[in-house]
Image (spheres, coloured by chain):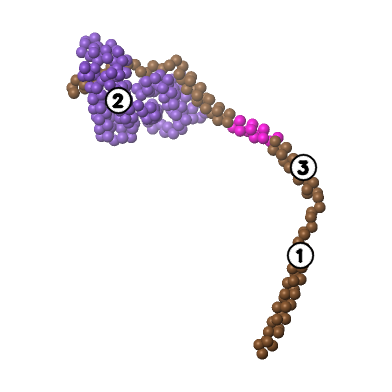
């Protein structure tokens, strides 16, 4: 027997069969988790974001018109929720080379070596988090979608409601700021 | 500048390669538990409200009966007569005399003019 489509499951949920929402959660939760982990560091925060996304999706399911795939509608809700999280947890902290952990220092030191690839991706992630901390929430939102989630300029414009040229300008400015922060964090430059 | 750009690109590439789509065990059950609990919470609110209303019925009835009992002897007692009847009649008499004086004065006034 063929599995029910998203549209069939949604129709069932809207007719009162709440349990039909579970297959939708199972199907899309890896994608929502992947997006949430780009925005939040702690696993508890990530889980809270994902939970909020699905609860919002469930409560607003009647507003889904079915003109676009359910995944697009859900990911748009997820993107808004992640942006809300950024605004509520705005850090705006400026980091320096002296703030780096041993692993992060090692990452910079081993940069030129052949064996560098895949050596310490977690250190790279921690460094990227530090760079992102210095950005304003809307710039961080755009650079996260562009550089980490690999969305196109057009997709980001659709998701954020900004014009494509505005997205490009914000992304360029944010990237420039990150590049300057790399100079500040790099222990080689500091010494 | 080129160097920092390369470092940034490397950092971003390595971050992207970290798998981020893993899901905690039975996470969907947690979502479904929240979804099923939400309407339940709404029903519970109505239940609590109706229980509170039913509980209020007995004290309300008691107060109503008490007020009715306290009010009934007063209702049975004779109504006091209106006291200001005497002064009112005196006032009426005075008014009649005044009126008579005014009429008399009006009759006599033309003779005075002459």
Residue B57 sits inside the magenta stretch: yes
Find the magenta span and give its range: B46-58
Look at 79% across and 54% down and name the residue there: B79
Local crowd size for mark 1, using a 10 Å CA cut-off: few (<14), some (14–19), many (≥20): few
Residues beneath discs 2 and 1 located on the same chain: no
Q: Is residue A80 left or right of residue B44?
A: left
**Residue behind mark 3:** B69
User: What chain does mark 2 sit on?
Assistant: A
Separation of marks 2 and 1 at Cα, in angstroms:
94 Å
Q: What color does chain B have in the rendering?
A: brown
Q: Is residue B92 left or right of residue A130?
A: right
Local crowd size for mark 3, using a 10 Å CA cut-off: few (<14), some (14–19), many (≥20): few
Does residue A35 sit above or below B70 in this rendering? above
User: What chain does mark 3 sit on?
Assistant: B
**Can residue A92 be seen here?**
yes
The quadrant in which residue A63 appears is top left
Give x and y (percent) for residue B94. 74, 71
- The disc placed on residue A94 is 2
In front: mark 2 or mark 3?
2
């Amino acid at each position: 027997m063929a599995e029910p489509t998203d549209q069939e499951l949604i129709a069932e949920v809207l007719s009162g069969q709440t349990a039909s929402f579970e297959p939708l959660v199972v199907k899309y939760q890896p994608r929502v988790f992947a997006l949430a982990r780009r925005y939040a560091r702690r696993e508890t925060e990530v889980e809270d974001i994902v939970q909020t996304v699905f609860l919002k999706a469930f409560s607003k399911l009647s507003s889904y018109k079915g003109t676009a795939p359910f995944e697009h509608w859900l990911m748009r809700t997820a993107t808004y929720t992640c942006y809300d999280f950024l605004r509520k947890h705005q850090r705006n902290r400026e980091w320096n080379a002296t703030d780096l952990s041993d692993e992060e220092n090692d990452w910079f030191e081993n940069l030129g070596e052949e064996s560098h690839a895949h050596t310490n991706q977690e250190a790279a992630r921690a460094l990227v988090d530090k760079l992102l901390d210095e950005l304003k929430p809307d710039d961080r939102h755009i650079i996260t979608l562009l550089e980490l989630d690999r969305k196109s300029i057009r997709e980001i414009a659709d998701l954020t409601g900004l014009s494509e040229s505005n997205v490009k300008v914000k992304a360029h400015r944010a990237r420039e700021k990150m590049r300057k922060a790399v100079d500040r964090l790099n222990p080689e430059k500091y010494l | 500048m080129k160097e920092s750009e390369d470092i940034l690109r490397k950092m971003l590439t390595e971050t992207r390669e970290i798998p981020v789509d893993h899901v905690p065990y039975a996470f969907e059950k947690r979502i479904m538990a929240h979804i099923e609990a939400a309407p339940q919470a709404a029903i519970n609110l109505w239940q609590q409200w109706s229980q509170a209303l039913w509980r209020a019925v007995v004290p309300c009835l008691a107060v109503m009966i008490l007020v009715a009992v306290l009010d009934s002897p007063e209702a049975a007692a004779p109504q006091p007569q209106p006291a200001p009847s005497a002064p009112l009649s005196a006032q009426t008499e005075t008014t009649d005399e005044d009126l008579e004086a005014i009429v008399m004065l009006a009759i006599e006034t033309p003779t005075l003019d002459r």
